Image (cartoon, rainbow, N blue to C red):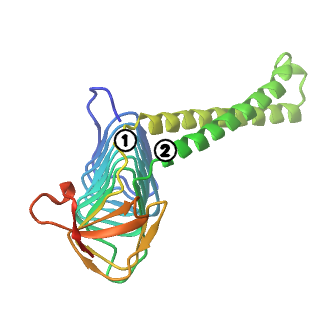
Amino acid sequence: MNQSNDPPQVIQGGLPDGQSFACAGDLVVEGNVGACRIECGGNLTVEGGILGRASGVIYVAGALSARFLSRVRIEAGGDICAISEINECYLTAAGKVLATTGTIAGGRIQARTGVEADVLGAESGEETTIVPGCADYAAQALVDLKKKRAAALANGERIRQTILPHLKDITKLNTAQKTALQKLDERLRELEAAREQWDREIKRIGSGTPGVASQNVIVRVALFPGVLLDFGEEQKKIREAVAGPVRVWYNAQMGQVKVAQIRDSAPVASQRPDPDAEA
C-alpha cells in the first residue's frame, strides 16, 4: 500500500466502461466504476459501486472498498470490502473479503485472512466458491510474473543484438531493411514497457502485508445451498440452508470441514463456535 504522506488522487464523476487508469498511490473515485482496468499502488476507495460487466479488472496494492461489487475481477494486497453485495466476482485478497451488511453470491472468493458476510450464496442455489486462508497465491503469482519478466528481458536482448550491428551505418540500409529495423525497434519498446509492467506487478504483490492466514468463514444471517467451501485439504458443498450466525472452518485434527452456530454473547467475528451446536 501507499507508504507516503501524499494525499490520494481523486477522480470526480466516476470511471465509465472502457477506461484504463493507473496511479502510484491512493485513489478515491467519487462515483461508480464501470468495466475498467485500474492499477492502484495504494488503497482504492470507490464511493459508488463497481460494475465490471465480466470484463473489468482491478489491481490494488493495498485495500479496496466500495458500496458494491458486481462481475469484476480484483486482486488486492489488503482487504476487499463491499458495504452491500458482492455479486459474481472473482476476488483474490491478501486480507479479508467482507460484505459488511450484505451478500456474497456467485463467482470465486479467495481470501488469506477469512471471509465475512451477512448472507453467503443465494436461495436459487447459485454456485459460489469460497477459498479461505490461502497462503500460496501471492508466491505463485510472483513466480509467474518473474517468468514473464525474464522472458521479456531475453526477447529484448535478442532484438538488441539483431539491431546493434545495423546501427553503425544505417545509411547503407535499403528501404525494406530500414522498415524491418524500425519494426524491431518498436517491438523492443513494447518488451521494455512489458518489463516495466511486470516490475510494477512484482512490487505490488510484494508490498502487501498480509495478516496471519485464517480459514474462518463467518456468516451472520444465512448460508445457502450451492456454496462450495474449499479449504485445500477438504471441500464442503452446502446442501441445505443454514441459519446464522455460523462459523465454517477446517478442523485439521478431524480432517473435516465444520459448520457451527455462534453464541450471541459476543461480537460474531471474535467468537468461537459452540461445539455442541454444529449445524
Q: Is residue 88 visible?
A: no
Q: Residue at 35% across / 37% down in the picture? A: 42
Amino acid type of disc 2? Ala
Relative to 260, 180 lies left or right: right
Amino acid type of disc 1? Pro
Q: Position of residue 160 (x, y in %)?
A: 77, 26
Residue pushed farthest front?
Answer: 253
Relative to 206, 194 lies left or right: right
Disc 1, SS: loop
**Corner quadrant of residue 225:** bottom left
Relative to 56, 170 lies left or right: right
Which of marks 2 and 1 precedes in the sequence?
2
Q: Tell me whether the residue at label 1 lies in contact with that at label 2, contact meaning CB atoms closer than 8 angstroms.
A: yes
Q: Position of residue 112 (x, y in %)?
A: 39, 50
In front of the other: 150 or 109: 109
- CA gap, disc 1 to disc 2? 10 Å
| Marker disc for residue 210 | 1
Task: Read off the residue under disc 2.
Answer: 138
Disc 2, SS: helix
Quadrant holding the C terminus: bottom left
**Corner quadrant of residue 5:** top left
**Corner quadrant of residue 188:** top right
Q: Position of residue 161 (x, y in %)?
A: 81, 25
Q: Is residue 49 above or below residue 172?
A: below
